[in-house]
Image (cartoon, rainbow, N blue to C red):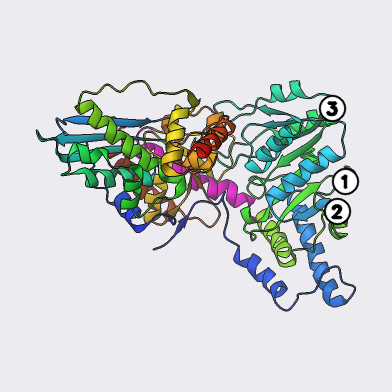
Amino acid sequence: MWEYTDKVKDHFLNPRNVGVMENPDAIGETGSLSCGDALKLFLKINKNERITDASFMTFGCASAVASSSALTEMIKGITLNDALKITNDDIADYLDGLPKAKMHCSVMGQDALRKAINSYRGIQIMEKPGNVVCECFGVTDLEIIEAVKENHLKSAEDVTCYLKAGGGCGNCLERIEEIVEAAKAEA
Amino acid sequence: MNIVYTDNNATTRVAPEVLEEMLPYLSEYYGNPSSMHSFGGNVGRKITEARAKVADLINADPDEIVFTSCGTESDNAAIHAALEVNPQKRHIITSNVEHPAVKNTLERLQKKGYTVTFAPVDTGGRLDTDLVYKNMSEDTALVTLMWANNETGVIFPIKEVAKKANERGIIFHTDAVQAVGKIPIDVKDSGVDMLSLSGHKIHAPKGVAALYVKKGLKFSSFMTGGHQEKGRRGGTENTASIIGLGKACELAKGHFWEMDKRVRQMRDYLERQLLEKIPSSSINGEIKNRLPNTLSIGFDAVEGESILLLMDQAGICASSGSACTSGSLDPSHVLMAMKVPFESAHGTIRFSLSIYNTLEEMDHIVTVLPQVIKRLRDMSPFWKNQN
């Protein structure tokens, strides 16, 4: 708790928009019990593709709850196109920052939001592209490369903080390090 | 707000009697115990007294006690010594629920070419002793097993395994950091060769610990330096803390009854009440063979850090079985080794009591925790409303 910002504490202790929504127009789910955190996001969307209401159910640590709460506040009243522009960094910034080891909580928010919007628009989400590197959390090489480039990650440890990859058994850490080095060279 | 401190397996408060004993050696009696003058020599005499008290707690001889800086150093020193005096042997046996002080040290040795057998535990946290015995060979330099587990409190059959190791001429070390002071320990009866204990788990300050080294056992120092500790551990003694550790051991010896009766009753009361008041909760580790102060309890469909932080709002200090931090996002290796389902492993909380706790404090936890769990379950996508 001592390393969380006041905003994170506030959104954890007084989460906004908690609960299952009746008759939602879209649902986005991410995470799982085995991962240690999961988010189920509910959206009401009007005919102009504007988000009129949002709520969430979250299993996870304080920053997972706070990220979910922040996300629902950020997206209420905006259009789906604008919502798609929200990145995990925006969610973290809204909370005045997250500890590095907890950045994956904000990634979870972005992921659930995209899934909800895609399902609303009837876009089939294809199997994740690329090859699975982290078996524990099902993270692919392409996801790692994207995260490294977008967030300027420098090490396998950074990747674990953002994507959880390598945070389970740790067997893939050397492979992640290789991918990070290659992606850094490309960037 | 009053603090209810139930995280004594993490660290303990320094007993007032311990602090009182130490203070003069942090102020007027600052001499070096190795000095020839009597000003230093008087401090040396107090260290001799402390050594005798530490020895007395575990039925060792004073000469068998080596003071160190922490439990981790004691473990490292023991492992180092066992390998140094048996350079031709390249195999070590341990369990898969050890403290990182042993686990990570052995994993590093694996990378250096040693073979390490990590014996599994069952769902109750009980050691597969048959597997330990089967793997003992001519090449085995060391068997190292914790006496009691820091997360679940489950106690390993140390005497039985030490005997088998002795018969095979294999050095046996035990990390008894969580057991010493909580249950009676007799090094002579148990037949261990080396034993680690730590001050701050038994109401002495942080930064002081000891390694028991059985008389006659070949030893090679981990920390090379001066002649201190009979050449077994170089470095000027942490005098005040060693004197504090001596006092803490003396006090612990007088508290076994209270640990076994009052503390155990408080723990059992807390356990019963929580199981009764919170649905879908379960105990980790076999119920009977546990330290009297430790309770590891899992709550389905909620996450440990959130529980801890909400309890923190009510002044309750405990710890969780999940370490949701960088590099370790899985629940603890101990719970995973016991095959505790993810559902409850992520929501596991460890309460560890001391003689300073009261029944009123247990009632405070029993009042607060059901509300905390309900609040988190109400926002959990995995909680099925059972009404």
- Which numbered disc covers residue B215? 1
| Residue A133 in the image: above or below residue B195 | above
Q: Which residue, given by chain and number where applicable, does mark 2 sit on?
A: B63
Q: Which quarter of the figure has residue A35?
A: top left
The residue that appears at 50% across and 34% down in the rendered structure is B284
Q: Which quarter of the figure has residue A173?
A: top right
Q: Which residue, given by chain and number where applicable, does mark 3 sit on?
A: B168
Other-residue count near label 2 (Cα within 10 Å), few / some / many at <14 / 14–19 / ≥20:
some
Say if the magenta span includes residue B257. Answer: yes
**Residue A145 position in % (x across, y down):** 46, 34
Q: Tell which of B216 and A161 is nearer to you.
A: A161
Quadrant of the frame with the C terminus of chain B: top left
Chain assignment, label 3: B
Discs 2 and 3 carry the same chain letter: yes
The residue that appears at 46% across and 33% down in the rendered structure is A144
Chain assignment, label 1: B
